[in-house]
Amino acid sequence: MAVRLCCLVVGALLAALAEAGEEYPCPHSAVVIHAADAASLPEACAGAGDALGFLGAAGLCVGMAIEVHVVHALPPGLDAESAGCYVHPQRQVYVLAPAMLERPPPSAGTAPPLRFRSLVTHEVAHAVAASNFSVEHPTLKAHEYIAGVTTIATMPAPARARLLAAHPGSGFDSAAQISATLFLLAPGWFAAEAYRHYRKPGNGPAFLRRVLAGEVLAEPDEF
């Protein structure tokens, strides 16, 4: 799950990244997909809808305009494994096209690659979270907790089971255990543990709202 926030990308670079192609307004939302390959439009729109549906049901506002660009190259400066990013404050998502995500089958004991639809879900979740935070500068761990939970919760059950099996754990026991350091070291494991934490009694949507309000996961890690 190599995805990142791209908060420092400037407008001129964004314009250069945009690829000519189809523009597709997703039905029943304010999400617009831009893609050179028309075949990726329905799946991208479905991934965005997964994020909006999950987070809307959790009580978040999901009516904001979001642009999703399906591209063949991401902004420079990300690590080589990155497959997508969200750019704030432009409210623009960039994800690699499906053809760029084709990888050799993972070796035994490693997580399966993130599907294109789930990749879009993850990045749109970042966009929705960014518009719902009450704090001016939300932390990386807060962002990645919400995006990771949304991604795994909306996966088909078999894919979710495979991902969780590839990242064994019992879930974070408390908010104090959730850190950006863990995300940077092992993003897939972090997302799996965040999802397990979310599923524990007393957490769920109520915990997401506390994250957005800055009541938890608001203090930056000390590196």
Image: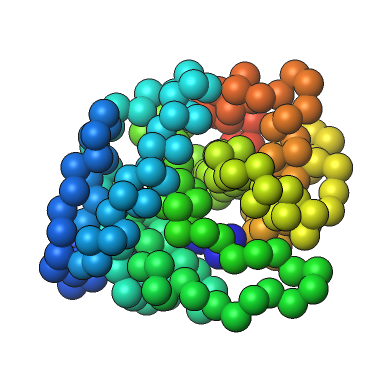
27 w.r.t. 35: above or below: above
Q: Which residue is located at x 38 percent, y 43 percent?
A: 46
Instruction: Between residue 114 and residue 159, name the one nearer to us.
Output: 159
- The answer to whether one can see residue 221 in this image is no
39 w.r.t. 135: above or below: below
Instruction: Between residue 131 and residue 198, name the one nearer to us.
Output: 198
Q: Which residue is located at x 74 percent, y 69 percent?
A: 110
Q: Position of residue 124 (x, y in %)?
A: 40, 45
Q: Specify the quadrant that holds the N terminus.
A: bottom right
80 w.r.t. 39: above or below: below
Left or right, 117 with respect to 158, comes to left
Left or right, 219 with respect to 5, comes to right
Instruction: Between residue 170 and residue 158, name the one nearer to us.
Output: 158
Q: Specify the quadrant that holds the C terminus.
A: bottom right
Instruction: Between residue 130 and residue 34, name the one nearer to us.
Output: 34
Query: Looking at the rendering, which quadrant does residue 61 occupy?
Result: top left
Q: Which residue is located at x 62 percent, y 19 percent?
A: 206
Q: Position of residue 195 (x, y in %)?
A: 69, 40
Q: How many marks?
A: 0
Q: Position of residue 2 (x, y in %)?
A: 55, 64
Query: Looking at the rendering, which quadrant does residue 173 occupy?
Result: top right
Query: Looking at the rendering, which quadrant does residue 155 occupy?
Result: top right
11 w.r.t. 104: above or below: above
